[in-house]
Image (cartoon, helix red, strand yellow):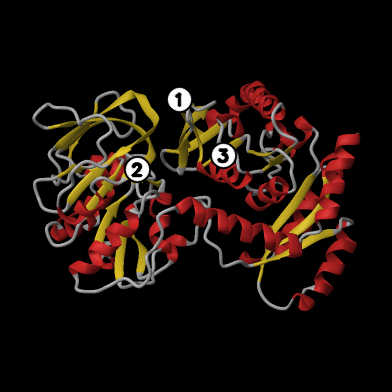
Amino acid sequence: MAGLCRIMSQDGYRTAPFKSQNMALNSYVTRDGLEMGRAQAMQAEAAGIKPRVCMNPILLKPTDHTGSQVIVNGQILRNMSAKEYFSYRKKLIPDIKKAFSILEKDADVIIIEGAGSPAEINLRKHDIVNMGLAQMVDAPVLLVGDIDRGGVFAQLLGTLMLLSQEERRRIKGLIINKFRGDKSLLDPGIEMLEEKGGISVTGVIPYMDISLEDEDSLTERFEKKKRGLIDIAVIRYPRISNFTDFNIFEQIPGAAVRYVASADRLLQPDIIFLPGSKNTMKDLAWMRSGGLEDAVKAMAGKVPICGICGGYQMMGQWISDPETWEAGGSMRGMGLLPVKTKLQKEKVCRQVCGKITKTEGIFSGITGLEYAGYEIHMGRTMLMEGEGTKGNEAFVSGRQKDVYGTYIHGIFDRSGIASAIVKALAERKGAKIKGEGFDNYMDFKNKQYDRLADTLRQHLNMEEIYGMLEESHLQ
């Protein structure tokens, strides 16, 4: 998706991404304060345009194994069980059509992403995101199989077999993604695939060592165990959200990010981050029951601890949920920050920017740097003394040394903030980081998008793909 958006934008077409329904906990806030999937924001970035909520009119944010918060056109509709949403979703078709028509006015090409498999035959009747959407907007389809997970030929042929004849006619090409090795060894399988499937393979894309934001459901970041000179531990609770906040640290020489899901894996990091959560109270209870809360608290005063959004709420004295937006009731927080949080109906969704005011401790080096990011939270957090946190102030500090909290996602992405933090952590342990890191994360990401586009141009038949678009336009 991002690669095609980049290519067609480079080729002079006004290009935009679209995903009618996304299920993800990584989300983004637009300039007008509306919430959408982070993946579509990234794809818009690759296309060189501003993210707009019409690129993702329906966002499902799982609250547990059987239910989600349903966000329509950037605003909360309500929480629904999977069964309730299955019955309700056909009512959202007008919203999908309207969002697509808005996007259509400003784009020459719209790259549509499906969700999961297009051959979910039990969901076909009211499909609004895969082949049902392709039929709704009369779009040609490229079917992509991930060979890295194994069984790609069965994936592609099985999918084609389960599609109806009308759906199958929309499939114009097959793509094999994330291939490792000598392609000549794959060629006999491709020939048989084309023979049995009756559809040509438009490209075989190699596995790329590239740094891009990925969907939370598909990320491989959680499995990385590498430790660097600067060991950064991010707590991985079950409902972790917006872990893209820490991607920038992965690019700084000498720094390594680990996602930690148990007390015995915490070890002795140089800094601990508590990330966002879709259910702060349940994730804090999870930390508490497994001993991870005690392990983190035992590190307070020894290493810096920083909470973002839900993690910030956890670090306070109390969390209350009188209207049961999450777990209901109230619970004691970790006691690391002198704040209390009350969950409320109105969700705060806004972009923020400013300059970091005087900050104590290990973060003192970022004082005066400019930041930009966004807030997404249902809680209102107040100082225990009854004073609200001040305006756009970036960080709230604790009574203990090097304990911080913030509501701002993306706060580390600008002005060398992440590099300054890593440098300070290195100096604390008497080490130096080789290289200067980078001040502009956007420049780095643009280079990654260009690398992605260059690779796709080498391994996709773009002439065929443009031909599919032209054929669709003429029909």
Could you tell which of marks 1 and 3 lies nearer the N-terminus? 3
Which label lies toward us, 1 or 2? 2
The answer to whether residue 205 is visible is: yes
**How much space separates mark 3 and mark 2, taking CA atoms?**
28 Å
Residue type indicated by callout 3: Asn
For disc 1, the marked residue is 78
The answer to whether mark 1 and mark 3 are in CB contact below 8 A is no
- Quadrant in which the C terminus is drawn: top right
Q: Which mark is residue 22?
A: 3
Q: Quadrant of residue 191?
A: bottom right
Q: Is residue 69 above or below residue 44?
A: above
The answer to whether residue 82 is visible is: no
Q: Is residue 112 above or below residue 151?
A: above
Residue type indicated by callout 2: Tyr
- Say left or right for 266 vs 181: left
Residue type indicated by callout 1: Arg
Q: Residues within 10 Å of mark 1 (few under 14, many from 20)?
A: few
Q: Quadrant of residue 108?
A: top right
Q: Position of residue 213 (x, y in %)?
A: 51, 53
For disc 2, the marked residue is 371
Name the residue at 46% across, 35% down.
68
Could you tell which of marks 3 and 2 lies nearer the N-terminus? 3
**How much space separates mark 1 and mark 2, taking CA atoms?**
32 Å
Q: Quadrant of residue 64?
A: top left
Name the residue at 28% across, 33% down.
392
Which label lies toward us, 3 or 2? 2
* Callout 2: SS: strand
